[in-house]
Image (cartoon, rainbow, N blue to C red):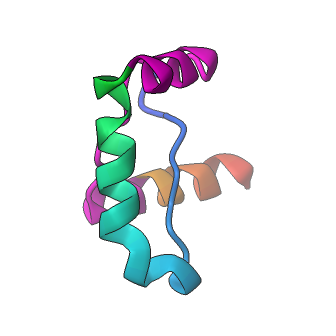
Amino acid sequence: ISVIHHALMVGPRLADQRDRLTETLMRMNDEVKGQEMLAGLGLEAWEVMDDEEAAFMIDLMETLRD
């Protein structure tokens, strides 16, 4: 299904670090080492997912699981 993507979500324990983690991940593509790590994961870059997109993904995965 083309609308399903891998996602990295921050849980309640790290909620106060969300912005810092997002900024770090978004900058990975700016450095050679970060680009190599992304390539190793099969990614070109990270994308920010808003709450609505995350809720959709969760609903879709729960539907597919049942």
Q: Residue at x 46, y 27 (%)?
A: 34
Is residue 66 shown left or right of residue 57? right
The answer to whether 24 is drawn above or below residue 46 in the figure is: below
Is-magenta flag for residue 27?
no
Check the image and name the residue furthest to the front.
32
Question: Nearest the camera: 46 or 33?
Answer: 33
Based on the displayed image, in which of its 4 quarters is residue 56 positioned? bottom left
Q: Residue at x 57, y 16 (%)?
A: 42
Counting from the top left corner in percent of width and height, residue 64 is at 65, 46
Q: Residue at x 34, y 55 (%)?
A: 22
Whether residue 43 is visible, yes or no, is: no
Q: Quadrant of the C terminus?
A: bottom right
Counting from the top left corner in percent of width and height, residue 7 is at 51, 46
Is residue 40 shown left or right of residue 35? right
Is-magenta flag for residue 45?
yes
Is residue 40 shown left or right of residue 60? right
Counting from the top left corner in percent of width and height, residue 46 is at 37, 35
Whether residue 34 is visible, yes or no, is: yes
Name the chief secondary structure element in magenta: helix
- Magenta stretch in the rendered image: 32-56
Counting from the top left corner in percent of width and height, residue 61 is at 59, 50
Q: Residue at x 41, y 75 (%)?
A: 17
Check the image and name the residue furthest to the right.
66
The answer to whether 42 is drawn above or below residue 59 in the figure is: above
Question: Nearest the camera: 63 or 45?
Answer: 45
Based on the displayed image, in which of its 4 quarters is residue 51 positioned? bottom left
The answer to whether 13 is drawn above or below residue 1 in the figure is: below
Is residue 63 shown left or right of residue 34? right
The answer to whether 12 is drawn above or below residue 27 in the figure is: below
